[in-house]
Image: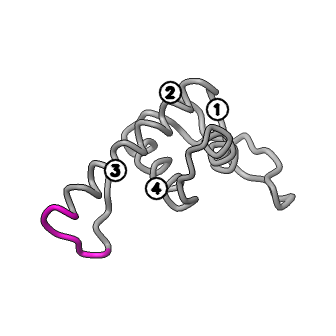
């Protein structure tokens, strides 16, 4: 899902919507492979596969997939890259 906060229109808006949908599909595919992950683990997995999505795009995809009921935020946490606990999301 593309949140049009930059007020795009026409062909540019259509392109952005397609791109966001593709990112959602890719992130969901990673969840299906891994079963569960933190947002940073998703970024690392994609980066290691040569897919360099911005962190904000991964966060947006996680939010969209959560709203669609495809994944869920758990109460479980792992230590993230800055030494802080971060939530794990899991495929429904």
Q: CA distance from mark 3 to mark 2?
A: 24 Å
Q: Are marks 2 and 1 in contact (CB under 8 Å)?
A: no
Which residue in the protein does label 4 denote? 60
The colour scheme used here is one colour
Which residue in the protein does label 1 denote? 36
Q: Secondary structure at mark 1?
A: strand
> Closer to the camera: disc 3 or disc 2?
3
Q: Secondary structure at mark 4?
A: helix
Q: Which mark is residue 19?
A: 3
Q: CA distance from mark 2 to mark 1?
A: 10 Å
Is residue 6 shown above or below 32? Answer: below
Task: Look at 50% across and 35% down and name the residue there.
Answer: 71
Is residue 20 shown above or below 7? Answer: above
Left or right placement of residue 28 versus residue 14 in this view: right
Q: Position of residue 59 (x, y in %)?
A: 53, 55
Counting residues from the start of the chain, the first of labels 4 and 2 encountered is: 4
Task: Look at 64% across and 46% down and name the residue there.
Answer: 47
> Quick one: label 4, few (<14), some, or many (20+) residues within 10 Å?
some
**Magenta span contains residue 43:** no
Counting residues from the start of the chain, the first of labels 3 and 4 encountered is: 3
Q: Quadrant of residue 76?
A: top right
The magenta span reads: 6-12
> Closer to the camera: disc 3 or disc 4?
3
Q: CA distance from mark 3 to mark 4?
A: 12 Å
Is residue 49 shown above or below 86? Answer: above
Task: Look at 36% across and 51% down and name the residue there.
Answer: 20
Counting residues from the start of the chain, the first of labels 3 and 2 encountered is: 3
> Quick one: label 3, few (<14), some, or many (20+) residues within 10 Å?
some
Which residue in the protein does label 2 denote? 92
């Amino acid at each position: 899902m593309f949140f049009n906060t930059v007020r795009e229109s026409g062909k540019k808006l259509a392109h952005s919507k397609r791109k966001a949908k593709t990112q959602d599909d890719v992130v969901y595919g990673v969840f299906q492979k891994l079963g569960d992950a933190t947002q940073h683990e998703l970024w690392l997995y994609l980066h290691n596969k040569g897919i360099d999505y911005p962190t904000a795009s991964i966060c947006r995809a996680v939010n969209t997939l959560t709203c669609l009921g495809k994944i869920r935020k758990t109460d479980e946490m792992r230590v993230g890259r800055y030494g802080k606990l971060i939530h794990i999301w899991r495929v429904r």
